[in-house]
Image (spheres, rainbow, N blue to C red):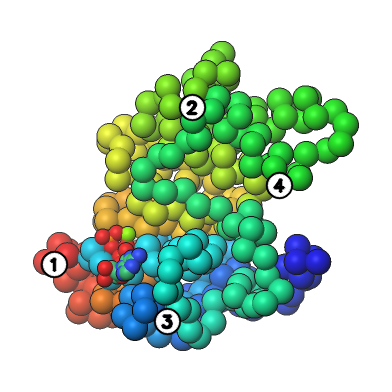
Amino acid sequence: MVSEYLEQPTEGTPAEVTGSAQPTVIECRSAWVKYGDNPAVKDVTLDFPAKQVTSLIGPSGCGKSTLLRSFNRMNDFIPGIKIEGQILYHGRDLYGREVDPVEVRRRIGMVFQKPNPFPKSIFQNIVWGPMINGLAPRSGRKAWQQELVQRCLEGAALWDEVKDRLHESGLSLSGGQQQRLCIARALAMDPEVILMDEPCSALDPRSTLRIEDLIDELRTRFTIIIVTHNMQQAARVSDLTAFLYEGNLVEHGPTQKIFTNPDQKQTEEYITGRFG
Ligand SMILES: Nc1ncnc2c1ncn2[C@@H]1O[C@H](COP(=O)(O)OP(=O)(O)OP(=O)(O)O)[C@@H](O)[C@H]1O
Ligand SMILES: [Mg+2]
C-alpha cells in the first residue's frame, strides 16, 4: 500500500548542507523543474530538516513557488511540467511510481497566498478533508469531529474567536482569520510538513504578526517551508534560509548567518534591498 510505503521507517540522514542535528524530511538532489523546455528551478540541491522553519527567498520569478509546489506534487496539475533529478521525502522519491500524490498532499500540506476557505461552514472546513480521506473512525464520529475541530482551531490560534460561530461560513471571517482557518484545515489532515507560499502577503500587519506567532508555535511539531518576500519576516520566523536567483540556489544556511554574514555578494545585495 502506498501509505505504508511512505511510512516505512528510514534512517534519518543528517542534514548535510545545514549541519542541523535534525533528520532530513525533504531533500532535493540536483532537482530541475521545467515548464516545457523552460527551466524554472535549476539543479537545486537542498535539504529541509525536521521541525525547522526554512524560508525560501529571492526576487519575483526566481522559482520559489515552483520549487515549493514540487514538494507536495501540486505541480502535477500543470500541463507540460517536468521534474528532473530527485526530490525525496524521508529518503524516498516523491515522484516514484509507488507514490500516491493524494497521500503526499495529506502528509505535506499547503497554505496559499490568498486565503481560500471552502464555501462551507467553519466546522465543515476542518472536517471535510479528513472525512473524504477516510480518517474518521467508524463509530463516535460526532465526538471525534468536535474534538478535531476544537484541536485544529486551537492549533491555529483561532478557536477563541470562532467557537460560538462554528456553523457560519468560513467566508464570513476576516482575511487574517480565513488564513488561520486554512492553516487549521491543513492541520486537520495530520501533516508532517506545512508549505506556505507567501501566507501573509494579503494580510494587514496585525494579522501578519498573528500568523508569525502561530508559525512560532507550530515549529515544535511540524517542518515548515515558507516563501516570503518580506525579509523581516524571514529573519523573524525561520531557522534556515535559502536564497534563489533565476532558478539557482545561491546560498542556504542558518537564517542568522544569511542575514548577517552571507557568503555570496548576491545574497547580501538581495537582503539589503539592492535588487529584487
Ligand atoms: N504555470 C506556468 N507555466 C509556465 N511557466 C511558469 C508557470 N508558473 C511559473 N512559470 C515561470 O517559472 C518561473 C518561476 O516562477 P515562480 O512562480 O516559481 O516564481 P516565484 O519565485 O514564486 O515568483 P513570485 O515571487 O513572483 O511569486 C517564472 O519565469 C515563471 O514565469
Ligand atoms: Mg511565487
From the image, tell me which residue sits under label 4: 133
> Mark 2 touching mark 3, by CB under 8 A?
no
Mark 4: few, some, or many residues within 10 Å (few <14, many ≥20)?
few
Distance between the alpha carbons at the discs numbered 1 and 3: 25 Å
- Regarding mark 2 in the picture, which secondary structure is present there? helix
Task: Point out the tag, 4 or 1, that comes first from the N-terminus.
Answer: 4
Q: Indicate whether 123 appears above or below 129.
A: above
Point out the quarter of the image occupied by ligand 1.
Answer: bottom left
Q: Quadrant of residue 186?
A: top right
Horizontal side of residue 230 vs 121, given as left or right: left
Which residue appears at 56% of the width and 13% of the height?
164
User: In what element is the residue under mark 4?
Assistant: loop
Of mark 3 and mark 4, the one earlier in the sequence is 3
> Is residue 175 visible to the viewer in this orientation of the structure?
yes
CA distance separating discs 2 and 4: 21 Å
| Amino acid at circle 4 | Asn
Q: Which residue is mark 2?
A: 170
Label 2 with label 4: CB-CB less than 8 Å: no
SS for callout 1: loop
The vertical placement of 5 against 190, above or below, is: below
* Coordinates of residue 258 in the picture (x, y in percent): 32, 69
Q: Earlier in the sequence, mark 2 or mark 4?
A: 4
- For this view, does 259 lie left or right of residue 129? left
Q: Residues within 10 Å of mark 1 (few under 14, many from 20)?
A: few
- What residue is drawn where x is 81% and y is 66%? 1
Q: Mark 3 and mark 4 in contact? Answer it, CB < 8 Å.
A: no
Nearest to N terminus: mark 2 or mark 3: 3
Q: Quadrant of residue 102?
A: bottom right
Q: Residue at x 71, y 47 (%)?
A: 133
Q: Identity of the amino acid at label 1?
A: Phe
Q: Which residue is mark 3?
A: 32
Alpha-carbon span between mark 2 and mark 3: 37 Å
